[in-house]
Amino acid sequence: DAGVIQSPRHEVTEMGQEVTLRCKPISGHNSLFWYRQTMMRGLELLIYFNNNVPIDDSGMPEDRFSAKMPNASFSTLKIQPSEPRDSAVYFCASSRRAANTGELFFGEGSRLTVL
Amino acid sequence: DAKTTQPPSMDCAEGRAANLPCNHSTISGNEYVYWYRQIHSQGPQYIIHGLKNNETNEMASLIITEDRKSSTLILPHATLRDTAVYYCIVRVAGGNEKLTFGTGTRLTIIP
């Protein structure tokens, strides 16, 4: 089975530009998580969805960030306008709600650099 | 999620057992102990989890104290590929529950 697929793997943009990160969860998984990782703050949970519904977005830094999950096989994380402090690696993860292990499967991440 | 405490870094000789400790003194009765690791620039990877009994799988063993206030992850025969940051996390079970990462232990396997 394919794992969690994220795109783009690398993005370099200028301050003020809109950035859209994409995630395709593992088929059959109904929970999806967006994380951000920086050297200073480590791995932070931004938002997570169950059955395409946002459950907890308390980690979303500010109104410039938004996330959507229009269907079970696709999610986006949008930053508009982007700022240099948004530079980080953004990870998407998915899991099966009924799974006994509660294991989250992570994608390879999208490395964002905002100049 | 209850807070966990881990040493920031550890070294282990290749081929020896790596024992990574974790304190979770405020763990609740319905919270499990999970271990994940993150190899440089990759996404975190699930290793093992347990409630109160010791657990073993193909990757590692998890030893949880009787009072459940601490645990140890054991990599029985460490290899250079085990060099990574290891995260100990406590959370309720179920794939729909969020996972909150701390700072973890940076384990370096020495040749």
Image: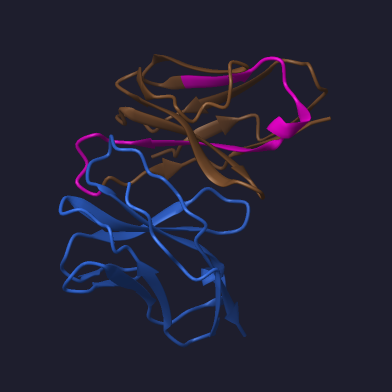
Residue occupying the point 39% across, 30% down? A32
Magenta region:
A75-101
Q: Is residue B73 left or right of residue A83?
A: left
Question: Total number of numbered labels?
Answer: 0
Colour mapping? by chain
Quadrant including the N terminus of chain A: top left
Foreground pick, A72 / A33: A33
Quadrant including the C terminus of chain A: top right
* Chain A rendering hue: brown
Residue occupying the point 31% across, 68% down? B58
| Residue A79 forms part of the magenta stretch | yes
The chain displayed blue equals: B
| Residue A107 forms part of the magenta stretch | no
Which of the 4 image quadrants contains residue B26?
bottom left
Task: Please state the horizontal and vertical placement of residue A78, each as a whole percent of the image.
Answer: 60, 18
Q: Is residue B18 left or right of residue A110?
A: left
Residue occupying the point 77% across, 30% down? A84
